[in-house]
Structures are given as C-alpha cells and as structure tokens.
Amino acid sequence: MIDRVMKTIKNGNGGGLVTAVLQKNKGNEFAEGGQRSERYADLVLKIDRFGQYESMLTIGKVKSAIGRTPVGRTFGFTITDHGANLQYIREIVKCSTCWTKGIIRKNGEQKKCPTCKGKKYMDKIGNKEV
C-alpha cells in the first residue's frame, strides 16, 4: 500500500516539497514496502549504521539528475551534539580487498579484513581505512 500512499501525498501536494521518512531494516536495500516505496520518490537517501560511532548515507535515486549522476555514491559521517551537527563528512567506497564482505580468507581461516577493519568501506581520498 505504500506506493498508493506516496502517490496520494505527491499528487495532493502540487508543486511543493514533501519529505517522507520510511523505516529501513538493517541489511535491507529498500524501506518497508520494498521497491514500491521508491516508485514515486524524486530523491532517495538511505542512511545505515557505519561502524560503532558513524553513519553511512547512500544516494539511491535522483530523478532528472543534471550532469554526472550521483546515484550509488556513499558518504560516511559522524553525528555530534545530540544529533544537531554532521561532522567528518567524506565519500567512501567499497573496500578493494574484501569487496564489502568485511572478512577475508587467509590460510583457510576467516579473518577481519585488514584494509577496512571489517567496516566494508574505505575513504575514497587516499583509500585510507575508515
């Protein structure tokens, strides 16, 4: 039913801006309602936990993007002052050692990836661990 609700909100708003926030379970690609939850959205931003103290924002959909499409780009950030400020914002990319598995096999054993420390992503600039 989420796609009908989103369409009703969008059509009833005219030319204004609506910010709909949907819950997304850990590890799921889409919010509650699956792919239908994004059908009428013009912009989709997905926020996930990233390690113990950080969050990760992934640009999921941009309708009518001009120039280079930002879809799929991912950013890491820290929230401070009780959710009031975003700090240490930087673009992150998939780890080139474990390819977002967080673990590698060495001598038949599974070990935490030494490059990303199990976080599955690393800073784009300089490819440093995050």
Image (cartoon, rainbow, N blue to C red):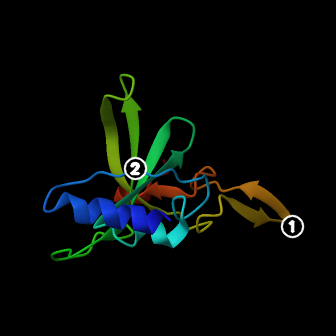
Residue that extends furthest to the right in the rendered view of this protein: 108
Image height of 4 relative to 13, above or below: below
- Residue at image mark 2: 21
Write the residue at 40% across / 37% down: 78
Q: Which mark is residue 108?
A: 1
Under mark 1, the amino acid is Gly
Q: Residues within 10 Å of mark 2 (few under 14, many from 20)?
A: few
Viewer-closest of 105 and 15: 15
Mark 1 to mark 2 CA distance (whole Å): 44 Å
Q: Position of residue 130 (x, y in %)?
A: 48, 47
Indicate the quadrant where residue 58 lies: bottom left
Asked if 84 appears above or below 107 in the picture, the reply is above
Q: Amino acid at mark 2?
A: Val
The residue closer to the viewer here, 94 or 41, is 41
Percent coordinates x, y for residue 55 in the rendering: 46, 44
Q: Is residue 106 above or below residue 23?
A: below
* Residue 48 image position (x, y, % from top left): 50, 50
Q: Earlier in the sequence, mark 1 or mark 2?
A: 2
Q: Nearer the viewer, residue 61 or 99?
A: 61
Query: Horizontal placement of 37 versus 104: left or right?
Result: left
Q: Going 53% across and 54% down the picture, which residue do you hit?
A: 24
Other-residue count near label 1 (Cα within 10 Å), few / some / many at <14 / 14–19 / ≥20 = few
Mark 1 element type: loop
Q: Residue 11 sits in which quadrant? A: bottom left
Residue 67: percent from the left, percent from the top? 16, 77
Secondary element under disc 2, as helix, strand or loop, is loop
Question: As drawn, is 16 to the left or to the right of 102?
Answer: left
Q: Which of label 1 and label 2 is nearer to you?
A: 2
Dividing the picture into quadrants, the one containing residue 64 is: bottom left
